[in-house]
């Protein structure tokens, strides 16, 4: 009995250790870089000699370093953004660099030049210049701040990304779909566990820094073939953040010309036009050139002649009433395009604790109403940051999304579980034929499931616009949570440890 207990205890410890090892191993693929590095030198303006022991500080962060025997300094794990930096050493003027930009996973070089102090308290300010070429970038990388994005006429992060070179609408990078692209927010991968498609909706107002890599992916980018998108949200370390962006346009048709149910519409006219509705499009009412512009219809008289059972008792006007009833669906677009984008965050006293919450809601009406008239997407993103001390930082992350709309295809619901977005739906390939002319199969009587240009009653092909059930109702929920711990060991070493869960 004791041996069995010992075996069970050893097995439990082994499994626990294995789980921890796997968690740390997987974290290396789940946790992406969210910071940059600043390096440079401090020298004497008159002699050009290196100044040893100068203190280089980044205002408002508590980060800094001292120059070594070569006058060089290194500051690791700097959050992306714009900073003011200063170099101080006794007996010399304080050198100040303004608007120093730090980018994700890149090194910013700032060289300070100072001279012997002539007046106590005197400082020399210099506006930092961004180099034309980044020496530590081997691939195609775009780094943009949230402020720069807000100055561009786009309504979402996705719109901005799709405008970049090498990126097509839908975040298709160099021909690779979104499921082949790494999408990371605050160091946490948002890739879905079901089909590999990442959750890309993020509030534009929450973005502090955005990096798009479209070529030359390094070994640190896991599970990606097309490219990598890395987003760092704002850090309200010393100020409150409140930003709201609302966009709405009036409901309007997304097609040119007349309504699909207009008497002169392409699919409508052969059944309604007085010249051809009785004897059909080939009955002499239209010439051959006019016939070629519309679908073929054999006429209501042929429908009456071929009807059996109860359907045989209907006259032409009654058949037209049945036709209108079968196509009673309202095809008018009544929903508006709508977007609500909001972010709020603030520090909690002087404790080193702060939080950020962002919300994004989108409504995109479909080209024509189906079981649902619009695609709707609601997203909530929250993170809490805490500075344990000047070198240790803890971040907890939660992101949830709820999408509702209609399915891509009935047979795609298993491997394409998320709903199709608004606008024009996927082309309704199906059994409907251009030569199918009856409203329904008259030999089977009046069937409420059959519609224009389709005898099969399965709502495919060219009748789909008048049906409700071509695309199934679809909801898709995603929850992502995780945490990271960052420790800067010394001026040249730091590490990240973290985990994430996706459901």
Image (spheres, helix red, strand yellow):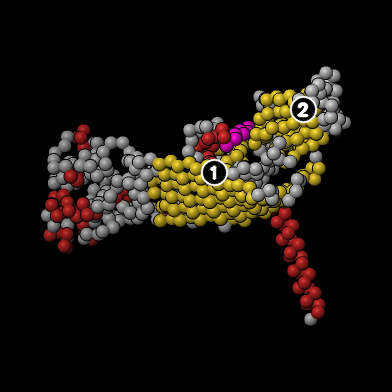
Q: Position of residue 396 (x, y in %)?
A: 64, 53
Q: Looking at the picture, does residue 232 appear above or below residue 11?
A: above
Tell me which secondary structure the magenta stretch mostly adopts: strand
The residue beneath circle 2 is 121
Magenta region includes residue 142: yes
Q: Is residue 500 rendered to the left or right of residue 154?
A: right
Depth check, mark 2 against mark 1: the one in front is: 2
The answer to whether residue 352 is visible is yes
Q: Is residue 231 rendered to the left or right of residue 71?
A: left
Q: Position of residue 194 (x, y in %)?
A: 55, 55
Q: Is residue 117 rendered to the left or right of residue 427?
A: right
Q: Secondary structure at mark 1?
A: strand
| Residue nearer the viewer, 356 or 290 | 356
* Total tally of numbered discs in the picture: 2
- The part of the chain drawn in magenta is 139-146
| Residue nearer the viewer, 347 or 455 | 347
Which quadrant would the N terminus be assigned to in this image?
Answer: bottom right
Q: Looking at the picture, does residue 104 appear above or below residue 31?
A: above
Q: Position of residue 65 (x, y in %)?
A: 79, 37
Farthest residue in the front direction? 120
The answer to whether residue 30 is visible is no
Q: Answer few, some or many: residues within 10 Å of disc 1's Cα (few below 14, many 20 plus, some between 14 and 19).
A: some
The residue beneath circle 1 is 242
């Amino acid at each position: 009995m004791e041996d069995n207990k010992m075996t069970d205890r050893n097995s439990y410890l082994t499994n626990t250790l294995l789980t921890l090892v796997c968690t740390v191993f997987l974290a290396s693929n789940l946790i992406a870089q969210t910071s940059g590095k600043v390096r440079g030198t401090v020298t004497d303006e008159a002699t050009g000699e290196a100044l040893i022991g100068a203190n280089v500080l980044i205002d408002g962060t508590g980060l800094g370093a001292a120059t070594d025997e070569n006058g060089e300094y290194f500051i690791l794990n700097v959050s992306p953004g714009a900073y003011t930096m200063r170099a101080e050493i006794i007996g010399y003027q304080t050198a100040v660099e303004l608007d120093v930009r730090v980018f994700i996973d890149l090194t910013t070089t700032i060289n300070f030049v100072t001279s012997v102090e002539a007046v106590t308290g005197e400082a020399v300010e210099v506006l930092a210049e961004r180099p034309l070429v980044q020496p530590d970038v081997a691939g195609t990388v775009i780094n943009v701040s949230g402020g720069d994005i807000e100055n561009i006429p786009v309504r979402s992060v996705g719109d901005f990304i799709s405008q970049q070179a090498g990126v097509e609408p839908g975040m298709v990078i160099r021909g690779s779909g979104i499921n082949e692209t790494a999408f990371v927010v605050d160091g946490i991968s948002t890739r879905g566990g079901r089909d590999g498609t990442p959750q890309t909706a993020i509030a534009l107002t929450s973005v502090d820094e955005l990096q798009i890599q479209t070529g030359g992916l390094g070994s640190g980018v896991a599970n990606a073939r097309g490219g990598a998108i890395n987003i760092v949200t704002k850090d309200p370390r010393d100020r409150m953040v409140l930003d709201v962006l609302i966009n709405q346009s009036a409901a309007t048709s997304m097609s040119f010309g007349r309504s699909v149910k207009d008497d002169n519409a392409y699919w409508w006219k052969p059944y309604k036009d007085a010249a051809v509705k009785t004897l059909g499009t080939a009955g002499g009412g239209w010439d051959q050139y006019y016939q070629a512009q519309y679908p073929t219809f054999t006429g209501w008289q042929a429908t009456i002649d071929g009807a059996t059972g109860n359907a045989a008792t209907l006259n032409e006007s009654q058949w037209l009433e049945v036709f209108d009833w079968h196509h009673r669906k309202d095809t008018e677009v009544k929903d508006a395009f709508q977007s609500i984008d909001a972010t709020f965050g603030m520090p909690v006293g002087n404790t080193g604790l702060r939080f950020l919450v962002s919300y994004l809601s989108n409504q995109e009406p479909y080209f024509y109403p189906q079981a649902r008239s619009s695609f709707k997407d609601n997203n909530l993103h929250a993170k809490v940051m805490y500075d344990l001390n000047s070198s240790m930082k803890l971040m907890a992350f939660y992101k949830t999304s709820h999408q509702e709309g209609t399915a891509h295809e009935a047979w795609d619901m298993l491997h394409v579980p998320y709903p199709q977005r608004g606008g024009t739906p996927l082309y309704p390939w199906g059994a409907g034929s251009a030569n199918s002319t009856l409203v329904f199969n008259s030999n089977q009587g009046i069937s409420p499931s059959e519609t224009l240009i389709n005898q099969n009653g399965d709502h495919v092909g060219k009748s789909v616009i008048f049906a409700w059930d071509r695309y199934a109702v679809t909801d898709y929920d995603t929850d992502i949570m995780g945490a990271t711990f960052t420790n800067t060991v010394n001026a040249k070493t730091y590490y990240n440890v973290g985990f994430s869960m996706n459901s």
